Image (cartoon, grey):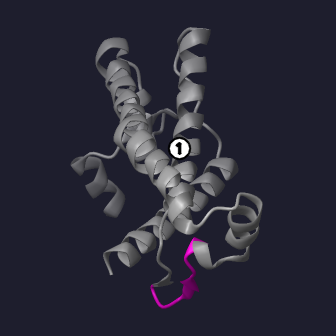
Amino acid sequence: MALQLHLSIGVTIAVLVILRIIWRIMNRVPDPEPGSKFMHLVSHLGHYTLYVMIVVMTFTGYLGTGVGTEYFFLFDLPKFADTKLFSYLVGDYLGMTFKEFEKPIDFIHKEILGKWLVWLLILGHAGAAFYHHFVQQDRTLHKMLIGRQSKEGTTKSITSQSFREIVK
């Protein structure tokens, strides 16, 4: 039951990631704050790495899960070991059983990505946001938060006072 819940959460994350990527493609990226070419390059690389890691974590989580699940009464998601892709790619081509395949996938998903890399990326992203806010004193953090367009065309974060104005 816990593995089925874990798989349902993973599928939910995958759906949210797909929606986020669609939203990102369809919406204009805010203009970057002034900074060096190196800072902008690192920023772009960090963001693309976060997107890739979200997709890879979801993918490896599914591959290493040994149970199928019913996804919120919408559809059944079979365990990877029961799919034709597993049978062809892992069983026939690699000559591995699910137990043999699961061990390296779990190591990548849990030990390498889950314990270290994802958390380092999250800390780096949060650290960069605070660096921009407290050291650079620019609008990067404000643009990351839920925002709205002001009359001057700048993005402002929604405060309790501005939220009341929006709701009126």
Q: Position of residue 73 (x, y in %)?
A: 48, 91
Label 1 CA crowd tier, 10 Å (few <14, some 14–19, many 20+): some
Q: Is residue 38 magenta?
A: no
- Left or right relative to 131: residue 14: right
Label 1 SS: helix
Q: Which residue is at 50% across, 65% downward? A: 99
- Left or right relative to 110: residue 61: right
Residue lying furthest front in this view? 95
**Can see residue 16?**
no
Location of residue 96 by image quarter: bottom right
Q: Position of residue 48 (x, y in %)?
A: 60, 36
Location of residue 8 by image quarter: bottom left
Quadrant of the frame with the N terminus: bottom left
Q: Which residue is at 51% across, 50% downward? A: 104
**Can see residue 159?**
yes
Q: Position of residue 23 (x, y in %)?
A: 61, 55
- Up-down relation of residue 25 to residue 122 (above or below): below
Magenta region, residue range? 72-80
In this rendered view, identify the residue nearer to me: 47 or 76: 76
Could you tell me the amino acid type at mark 1? Met
- Up-down relation of residue 11 to residue 159 (above or below): below
**Residue under pointer 1:** 53
Quadrant of the frame with the C terminus: bottom left
